[in-house]
Amino acid sequence: MRVLLVGAGGVGTAVTRIAARRDFLTHMVVADYDPARAEAAVAALGDGAGRFSARRLDASDEAEVRRVLREERCDALLNATDPRFVMPLFNAALAAGTHYVDMAMSLSAPHATAPYEQCGVKLGDEQFARSAAWEQAGLLALVGMGVEPGLSDVFARYAADELFDEIEEIGVRDGANLTVEGYDFAPSFNIWTTIEECLNPPVVYEKDRGWFTTAPFSEPEVFDFPEGIGPVECVNVEHEEVLLIPRWVGARRVTFKYGLGDDFIAKLKTLHELGLDATAKVTVPGADGPVEVSPRDVVAACLPDPATLGDRMKGKTCAGTWVKGTKDGAAREVYLYHVVDNEWSMREYGSQAVVWQTAVNPVIALELIADGSWKGTGVLGPEALPPRPFLDLLTAYESPWGLREGH
């Protein structure tokens, strides 16, 4: 399989390190707006760099992306950029006749008059609107194929197929005990995306009501995470799983809650109150005259790059799916989970735990597409495809998953 990887940040660089160990990959073109980042990702592979090449690419330039896909004879495009660039990359892959995989879906927009009650434009709406075109082209657009969304959706489908007869609730729960030495505030993932998902109205699904929204950070609960992480308070956050899971898995209610902590939530609220979460550009003085900048981009530029924090990080991160329902007439609850220890991911791959955990899943998906275990046409979420091959391969990648009975 020949793959165009767009984005050579933390997740993209981890993708190259994981993919370099797998035989399914014929060649990967590593592309980034900053060619130095793409070149560094390839150079870091050392003797394993033979199947990789680096080039500059503007992810917003749909025509250029399409040209590169054709020129490099790519079978698939893997999008490792932030959600702003989903639609040009998604459209370019369709136009070039290649499969497409992303880890975050097209952006939402809040309801104009009732943002904390009703959905406006939902995550992924723009992509699902083009599903028929992908079907007609005989191509697969696999959306939301990171860890959350992604592996969490695979867990939901596995639970429905093998663990439950009826499902009352599916709740994706994410928590960690990671610390970053030397920083008071150093998010372990892309801050642009973190602001987007945490400050937008969270979406909840209920079978009798459909999709609806609540206020940010609503419905706090303490969830006990496995492998020594322990209890973490989790709150509602906008996330793709709530928009994906109900399309293919029957459940009365679907939620996503993230363990943020009071300090992190307070800082996000402050950014919002100051308008520093805004994406619309403002004019500021510059050395050569007025300059237009996005406040959120300024915040991102002021914070450390999450990809560089691995040596200062300690602890574990856990992504998982809690499912409540019945099996053989008896009540049952399980938590399907995946834990990555930062010490392990740094030692084995040189990538910090959060970005490595995100990156491993699209690589597995590409391998399953390449060997024919996963196939389909149109715009599909991970839960539309058989879960067992994915979970087996995750274990084969030396990163096993777990199952805990009870809450």
Image: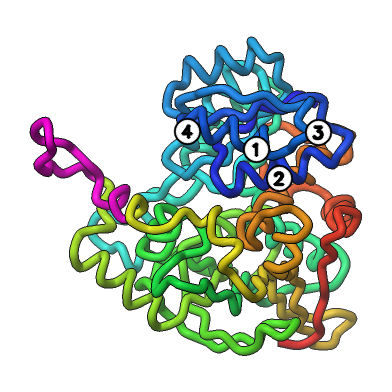
Q: Of marks 2 and 3, which one's residue comes earlier in the chain? A: 3
Marking on residue 101: 1
Helix, strand or loop for disc 4: helix
**In the displayed structure, would residue 376 be above or below residue 385?**
above
Label 1 secondary element: strand
Q: Position of residue 16 (x, y in %)?
A: 70, 39
Whichever of labels 1 and 4 marks the residue nearer the N terminus, that label is: 4
Residue 263 place in picture, x, y as percent: 38, 80
Please, which colouring scheme is shown? rainbow
Identify the residue position indicated by label 3 in the image: 47
Task: Tell me where residue 374 appears, x and y as whole percent.
Answer: 83, 40
Q: Residue at x 91, y 54 (%)?
A: 396
Residue depicted at 71% across the width and 85% down the height: 228
As shown in the figure, which amino acid type bears the numbered disc 3? Asp
Sort mark 3 into few (<14), some (14-19) or many (20+) by Cα contacts within 10 Å.
Answer: few
Residue 327 seen = yes
Q: Nearer the viewer, residue 186 or 292?
A: 186
Residue stretch rendered in magenta on the structure = 280-299
The x, y position of residue 391, in whole percent, is 85, 57
Cα distance in 3D space between marks 1 and 4:
12 Å
- Marks 3 and 1 in Cβ contact (< 8 Å): no
Q: Nearer the viewer, mark 3 or mark 1?
A: 3
